């Protein structure tokens, strides 16, 4: 147990050094209800699970256990991207990558292809990336568990260290096991006529909208991606459910969000890798040297309690 100097009380969060699937020097954060696993060697939050469970909600590419990304030789290195799984962050929008790094793909190296330094805190772990040469940005991610609730919070910070100004937003991406259904809690008034927009050509599989509840399943044959100006997502699996909340949105029109105004996005991957991505995005900001932006994402995980996934989603959306 740790000691909270602000309240003068003991917390229930413990941080333990572990090895994880072939990677040494990893961390297990636990509060007695949920556990998060951090792998600094690949800069990922690799798992979120209920206490006592062997597996969790996050998808992990077990074919890559213990491997490390090949170091990029320069800003325009086009080495193949390695898809480890777990939770990470990229700079938004993706359409700006060619201008900043001279290529469309793979992602910027310091965001996705290099180890991060890790420091433990009373509530979790702080990960810090090296400086990304294309964007001139350094990433810091504060990963913490609530002392009492089944909640993980990740505060992601981008600091502009060098180079010319960039326009960028925080983009958090969580790869998760194939769900029974994925849900978006649409706003009461959406800027999108259908409540969402398609961001890839693939047709969403079994998409339906009932009131404010939009849901879909993974398409097994095509890449599918949709976006919404909604702040909350839910992943309903066989034994647990995870709610993901973006930091509270700014007033409409006050700021510009990426990809035409998306605050959240859902991507579903075709076979043979059966995963989905639940993504949150922060507003775009113009960063000059010494500027910084930050956004927080909150993950709530609970046991599955209802046979109907729609009812399960309604329950977890009402939980916070």
Image: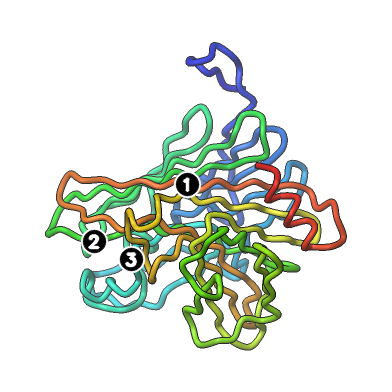
Q: Earlier in the sequence, mark 1 or mark 3?
A: 3
Residue 60 point in image, percent of width and height: 61, 63
Residue at (33% x, 53% y) in the render: 254
Q: Residue furthest front?
A: 189
Q: Is residue 119 visible?
A: yes
Distance of label 2 from label 3 (alpha carbons):
26 Å
The quarter of the rendered structure image containing the C terminus is: top right
Q: Residue furthest top?
A: 8
Residue 71, numbered label: 3
Residue at (80% x, 58% y) in the render: 311
Residue 167, numbered label: 2
Left or right: 47, with 173 as reference point:
right
Residue 290 point in image, percent of width and height: 17, 44
Q: Nearer the viewer, mark 2 or mark 3?
A: 2
Residue 248, numbered label: 1
Q: Is residue 66 visible?
A: no
């Amino acid at each position: 147990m740790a000691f909270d100097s602000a309240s003068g009380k003991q917390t229930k969060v413990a941080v333990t050094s572990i090895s994880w699937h072939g990677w040494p020097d990893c961390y297990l954060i636990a509060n007695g209800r949920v556990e998060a696993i951090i792998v600094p060697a690949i800069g990922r939050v690799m798992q979120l699970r209920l206490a006592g469970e062997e597996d969790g909600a996050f998808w992990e590419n077990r074919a890559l256990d213990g491997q490390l990304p090949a170091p990029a030789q320069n800003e325009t290195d086009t080495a193949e991207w390695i898809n480890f799984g777990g939770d990470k962050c990229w700079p938004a929008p993706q359409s700006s990558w060619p201008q900043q790094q001279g290529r469309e793909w793979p992602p910027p190296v310091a965001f996705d292809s290099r180890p991060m330094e890790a420091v433990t805190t009373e509530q979790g772990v702080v990960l810090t990336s090296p400086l990304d040469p294309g964007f001139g940005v350094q990433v810091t991610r504060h990963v913490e568990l609530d002392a009492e609730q089944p909640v993980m919070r990740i505060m992601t910070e981008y600091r502009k260290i060098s180079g010319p100004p960039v326009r960028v937003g925080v983009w958090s991406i969580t790869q998760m096991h194939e769900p029974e259904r994925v849900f978006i809690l649409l706003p009461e008034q959406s800027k999108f006529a259908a409540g969402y927009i398609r961001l890839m050509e693939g047709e969403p599989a079994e998409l339906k909208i009932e009131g404010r509840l939009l849901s879909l399943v993974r398409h097994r044959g095509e890449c599918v991606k949709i976006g919404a100006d909604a702040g909350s997502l839910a992943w309903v699996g066989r034994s647990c459910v995870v709610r993901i909340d973006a930091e509270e949105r700014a007033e409409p029109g006050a700021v510009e969000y990426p990809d035409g105004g998306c605050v959240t996005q859902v991507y579903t991957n075709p076979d043979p890798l059966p995963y989905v991505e639940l993504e949150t995005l922060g507003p775009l900001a113009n960063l000059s040297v010494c500027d910084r932006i930050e956004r927080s994402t909150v993950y709530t995980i609970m046991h599955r309690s209802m046979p109907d996934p729609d009812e399960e989603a309604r329950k977890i959306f009402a939980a916070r």
